[in-house]
Each structure stands twice: as structure tokens, then as C-alpha cells.
Image (spheres, helix red, strand yellow):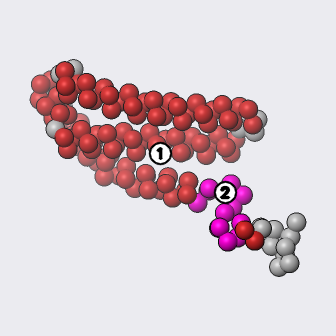
Amino acid sequence: MANAKGNLRSDLGRVRGLGSAKEGVRHWWVQRVTAIALIPLSLWFVAGIVFLIDVDRATAIQWLGSPVTLGLMSLFLIALIYHTVLGLQVVIEDYIHSHAVKLTLLLAIQFAGWGLAAAGIIAMLLITIYGG
């Protein structure tokens, strides 16, 4: 129902700046921030892979074992997976109309994303500790 000014949004909704999704602006910003963070991290990752083309296994493990490399690799993995989860969430919310299926898929991508990030970081730590 429209208020006195003919606006369909509630007074509280206008004050808070919330649209119908209640969190769309935050989601949009986080997706953009992760995309921007992925630009230098992806360039660094590709440069690292190019560096590792002609090195032996011990050198590659030593490279990964560096605190800077391990930190950047973890940031890259987290940003990449989080950005992917955000994108998949938008697709599911836009194109899946069954509430039960939508909720199941949203939960599945959240668990899969965080599980993959944790598994990747644990794998990198194990490689650096035990040498692969």
C-alpha cells in the first residue's frame, strides 16, 4: 500500500535504504570488492605458476612454504571461492522458483564453498609441513 507521498516503500524501508531483498546493496558491493581483489591476486597466481613451470618439486614446496606466498594463496582461494558463491547465489535466487529447492541449493553452495576453501588451505599447510 502506498504511503502519503505515493511511494510503495515503507517509511522504515526508505530510512534504512533497503530494497525488496533487504541486502542487495551489500551483496553487490561484496561481489565487486572480491572481483577487484581477484585482479591482482590472479595476476600474482599466474606469475607464480609460470615461475614454477621449470622448477623441481622441492623448490615448488619451498615457494609455497613462504609465509607471504601461503598468505597470498589463501587470500586468493578465499576470494575466488567467495566470489563464486556470491555469483551462484544470484543465479539461484533469480532462476530457481521453488522455495525448497532454492533453500537447498543456497545451503549446498555455502557448505561446498566454505568446505572447499578450508580443504584448500589445509592441503596447502600439509604440503608445506610434510613436503607433499
Q: Circle 1 is placed at which residue position? A: 83
Q: Quadrant of the N terminus?
A: bottom right
Q: Quadrant of residue 76?
A: top left
Mark earlier in primary sequence (1, 2) = 2
In the figure, is residue 57 to the left or right of 82? left
Magenta region: which residues?
A: 13-25
- Measured as percent of width and height from the top left, residue 100 is found at 73, 32
- Determine if residue 58 is in view: yes
Q: Quadrant of the C terminus?
A: top left
* Kind of residue indicated by mark 2: Lys
Per the model, the C-alpha gap separating discs 1 and 2 is 20 Å
Q: Which mark is residue 22?
A: 2
- Measured as percent of width and height from the top left, residue 93 is found at 67, 43
In the figure, is residue 18 to the left or right of 77? right
Q: Residue at x 66, y 63 (%)?
A: 18
Q: Residue furthest bottom?
A: 5
* Kind of residue indicated by mark 1: His
